[in-house]
Image: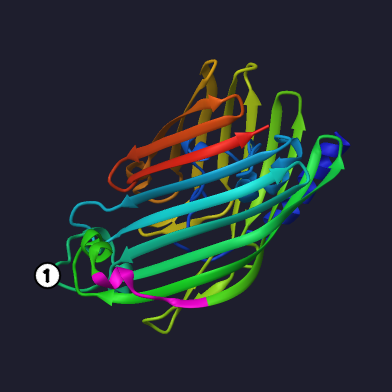
Amino acid sequence: MNKMLTFCTVGTSLLALGAGTGSAQSFDAAGTRAAGMGGAFVGVADDATAIYWNPAGLAAGSYFSLVLDGGNGDVTPDLSPRGSDNSSYFMGLAMPALGLGYYRLQASTVTPPLVLLAADGPLASRNLSAAAEVRLDTLVTHHGGVTLVQSLWEGVAIGTTLKVVRGIAASNSVAVGTAEQALDSEVAEIFGRATNKFDLDVGLMAAGGPLKVGVTVRNVREPHFEAAGEDRALVLERQARAGLSYAVSEDWIAAADFDLVKTKDAFGDRRDIAVGTEGRLAPRVFVRAGATFNTVGVDDAERRAFSFGGSVAARASVFIDGHFTTGSDRAGHHWGLAARFVY
């Protein structure tokens, strides 16, 4: 009990770092296996993608793990001036106390002009193709770093990913009326302004029997990147998420995550709850499913997403992963592929 109380106290201290401003790069931007579980992975994080999801997860993870991962997605409702697209690439090598990783995240967000962002009702979401421009913000970040893990007590570990972040930011007004048109325009390919910053992620993981509980704070220093095209900065916002997983049987786990702070996307504030499951369907076949729900905003029901994924063991320790996520117009469509070597 005393150990769990201390764990909760340290976790609460981390959460105090969680207040931040809006950003286009979501918490669940990388990781095919995690995405197949709906993004419920902070309390799982037992392979090299723990470098991204929860650094402390390496302590109770695989003895050796190598992951190559990529994904893409977009949210472009018909005739809407709001939308986004994103892509990710992840490469990580990990052992229980050490991880080395590189990942690239790209996010482009389209929103109406500032004068319309404060409008109520249909004005802020109608087709503006004949009325005004839209604003296109693009942030590409390259993260390279090292993950260090330290055991605090039996079953409880803390980990941190120390990283250098190269951000390339651009912000422009585009003379089109819909998000889809803006993302397809030549302006979307504009070369942004590059800046290098130091940042870190911090995580905790407690494991006991079939239960694991974790908490992660990402982008602790909340780096700002000056944008080319307009005199403004794009922010890699600080994010905080907690999660748990439970081994229902030897071959199946269930997991749930919940955001501890609000974040922003093209449609406004969000704070997500994610639930998911993963299990062995056959000796070499694994399946996953999950769902994500936004808990804030009047349109939260329009932003639910459902994920499906699976893995095939090409060899005993080599897995090929895939996932597909879909939902309403405001949930968009996302896919990912990965290769994992786990020993």
Q: Quadrant of the N terminus?
A: top right
Where's residue 124, x and y in %? 26, 63
Q: Residue at 27% across / 53% down in the picture?
A: 76
Q: Is residue 237 left or right of residue 198?
A: left
Q: Is residue 230 magenta?
A: no
Q: Residue at 44% across / 80% down in the picture?
A: 232
Q: Residue at 73% across / 42% down in the picture?
A: 95
Which residue in the protein does label 1 denote?
130
Magenta range is 186-194
Where's residue 322, x and y in %? 44, 35
Q: Is residue 329 left or right of residue 315?
A: left
Where's residue 184, x and y in %? 24, 62
Which structural element holds mark 1? loop
Q: Is residue 263 above or below residue 343?
A: below
Identity of the residue furthest to the left in this view:
130
Q: Is residue 118 visible?
A: no
Q: Is residue 23 above or below residue 280?
A: below
Q: Is residue 268 left or right of residue 20?
A: left
- Mark 1 crowdedness (10 Å alpha carbons): few <14, some 14-19, many ≥20: few
